[in-house]
Amino acid sequence: MTLGIFPPGRHNAITDVPGVRVGHCTISEGEGPLVTGKGPIRTGVTIVEPRPSVWRSPVFAGAHRLNGNGEMTGLSWIRENGQLTTPIGLTNTHSVGAVRDAIIAEIHRDRGDDESYFCLPVVAETYDGILSDINGQHIRAEHVEAAFRALSDGPVPEGSVGSGTGMICHEFNGGIGTASRLVPNAHSGAYTLGVLVQANHGQRRRLRVDGVPIGERIPTEIVSSPYEDLRKEMAGSGSIIVLIATDAPLLPHQCERLAQRGALAIGRTGGIGEHNSGDLLLAFSTGNDTLPGVGLGELDFEDIPVRMASDTVVELLFEAVIDATEEAIVNSMLAAATTVGRDGITAHPLPAEQLRAAVVGARENAEGAAS
């Protein structure tokens, strides 16, 4: 299902943006009752690389917070400096530090000891403790290294994979979702915009797809909710991370505006930025490749030439990012497999046929009413 007027890219993924790569490491071990430190484990790591060795050629970036009950490290420097200088790590809430340290080690393996530099990696999280032994802190450096080795610019596995392994979205199984859009421009024919989400948020009753109240048409009486085995009022207390990439040449303030519009898609699908939800968005642009590398070496007093997209193009990107983010959220639920987690708690995917029937039926009813 493609939402909106702009066509998707080749893979309908964030990796359609040239230079962007994604890698997953999935950890799924054990079953039965929760034993802290032993499992069951339903977690992982995902790495999103804006471009190879991004610390040597940073990209402009901007962030937005819909609700702040979450963590994305490195944002203070991005807000101050307007540049993203490291790969982005995604994981569970209690493993942010382990992933951050491992990213620093990965950068050091590339840069070595011959230069002086600093690293402020961007690592974001959502809570997978409903399905996984989150307090066991099972993420280690070797898992981050595996995600780096898996980096690819091809199709992106979605659903309950990598950092999305133990995530729940609108009381369906959720996790990683991605989508892309091609936006026309006068120079290269089209700019590419891609979105990747880690979706772990929302209540079933609020879920809407393409304006259709899917949560009302596929209630928990039809597809059960994992929260039925816990306290139902916990539903919606998760979070969502939205990463937005484009090769349109945007300055930091334009990236921030793009991140803000991604939040509209969270609302359009039924998210409200609940009190216990961390809804954090980061947008970056690979459209400039003249920014100097990050280091502590000699000062450079030269001017730096940069390009900037027009407001007309930026407005088209607004529409594209909303459509792509909505589709990425939906894809996270469609692509996920049924996951049985700790204590037998089970999360089911969004059933594709029922979703299609509901959306098609709504469109036919609207057309009939219009005629």
Image: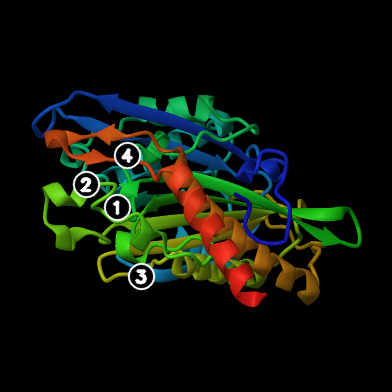
Protein image colouring? rainbow
Point out the image quarter for the C terminus: bottom right
Asked if the residue at tag 2 contacts the one at tag 4, i.e. Cβ–Cβ closer than 8 Å, the answer is no
Q: Is residue 82 above or below residue 188?
A: below
Please state which of residues 27 and 223 is positioned toward the viewer in this rendering: 223
Local secondary structure at mark 4: helix
Q: Position of residue 250 (x, y in %)?
A: 72, 64
Q: Amino acid at mark 3?
A: Gly
* Alpha-carbon span between mark 3 and mark 2: 20 Å
| Relative horizontal placement of residue 115, taking residue 16 as reference (left or right) | left
Asked if the residue at tag 1 contacts the one at tag 2, i.e. Cβ–Cβ closer than 8 Å, the answer is yes
Disc number placed over residue 171 in the picture, else none: 1
Q: Closer to the N terminus: mark 2 or mark 1?
A: 1
Please state which of residues 73 and 190 is positioned toward the viewer in this rendering: 190
Q: Is residue 318 above or below residue 96?
A: below
Asked if the residue at tag 1 contacts the one at tag 3, i.e. Cβ–Cβ closer than 8 Å, the answer is no
Disc number placed over residue 273 in the picture, else none: 3
The residue identified by callout 2 is 226
| Relative horizontal placement of residue 168, taking residue 359 as reference (left or right) | left
Quarter location, residue 81: bottom right
The residue identified by callout 4 is 98
**Residue 89 visible (yes or no):** no
Q: Amino acid at mark 1?
A: Glu
Q: Position of residue 247 (x, y in %)?
A: 74, 53
Asked if the residue at tag 4 contacts the one at tag 3, i.e. Cβ–Cβ closer than 8 Å, the answer is no
Q: Closer to the N terminus: mark 3 or mark 2?
A: 2
Q: Residue shown at 43%/55% (left/top)?
A: 241
Q: Closer to the N terminus: mark 3 or mark 4?
A: 4
Q: Amino acid at mark 2?
A: Pro
Please state which of residues 199 and 294 is positioned toward the viewer in this rendering: 199
